[in-house]
Image: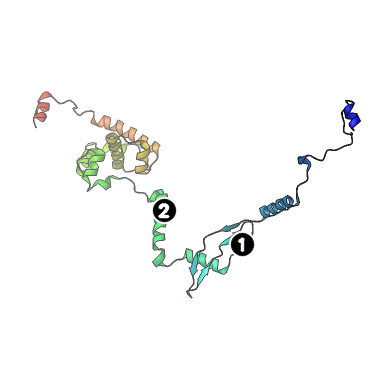
Amino acid sequence: MLNVFLSGERARLKKTAVPSIFDFNKPPSTAAVSRAERYKDRSLLPKPVTVASPQVHDPGNEPVVMDTELILGAEVDVADGDEQLCELTEEEPASTGGCKQQDAAVQCSLLCPDALHRFSHKDFVNDSSALRFYTSFENYQHLLLFFAILGPAVNELRHFPSLPDVLDQLLLTMIKLRLGKDDAELAYMFQISRSTVSSIFVTWTNFLYFQLKELNLWPDGQVIKYCCLL
């Protein structure tokens, strides 16, 4: 080997030689293999889920504790105690179930459209301040007087099945004229569709125009001076 080096020739590996002294060619140790196998086995195990443990008292005053550890993917059998828990939940005595029944009634009233209160002219019979706010009429008698002035032609207008009371239709029109409310809000107040609100408003504004166009909107100067002196 020394003679080869001194002669200027390089030492070459044989073609059949395989290097085995590098770090990336070293096989893993026994401890590393065992750790990898243990990690793989733990990842395959089902994970327990911890749930609340409610206690149900039976007639004998003995608490029944439900299982608090469930295994994902495993079958769960319903025991007699669980069935008894369901029966107690569905049929509670009046002393403890009154609040839940009230909550259910409130939820039903919020979800059922028929349970919502619909705006009506009858709501303002004894509430002059609210009627003045919504329509500018002084009181309910003032509203009825204006309705009577319009004459019997109000009964010949287009019929709206969802809001058949013509006085309610007049109330809707006056609220929109007084406060400029959106059709969507009026539809919610009177429990009708937005298209019906638009049709009612167009019908009544045209009707009011033809019924009230004979009124003198521009009084003479003497009337204006008299009213200014009051």
The secondary structure type at the circle numbered 2 is helix
At horizontal 68% and vertical 52% (from top left) the residue drawn is: 39
Q: Inspect this view and state whether residue 159 appears.
A: no
Residues 106 and 166: in front is: 106
Q: Amino acid at mark 2?
A: Gln
At horizontal 11% and vertical 24% (from top left) the residue drawn is: 221
The residue that disc 1 covers is: 76
Position of 107 relative to 204 (above/below): below
Q: Amino acid at mark 1?
A: Val
At horizontal 39% and vertical 67% (from top left) the residue drawn is: 95
Q: x, y percentage for residue 48?
A: 60, 58
Position of 70 relative to 215 (above/below): below
The residue that disc 2 covers is: 107
The secondary structure type at the circle numbered 1 is loop
- Which label's residue is closer to the chain start, 1 or 2? 1
Count the numbered circles shown. Answer: 2
At horizontal 76% and vertical 40% (from top left) the residue drawn is: 24
88 relative position to 151: left or right:
right
Q: x, y percentage for residue 219?
A: 15, 26
The image quarter containing residue 172 is top left
**Which mark is on residue 199?**
none
Quadrant including the C terminus = top left
Q: x, y percentage for residue 94?
A: 40, 66
The image quarter containing residue 177 is top left
Q: Inspect this view and state whether residue 68 appears.
A: yes
- Label 2 neighbourhood size at 10 Å, few (<14), some (14-19), many (20+)? few
Residues 212 and 85: in front is: 85
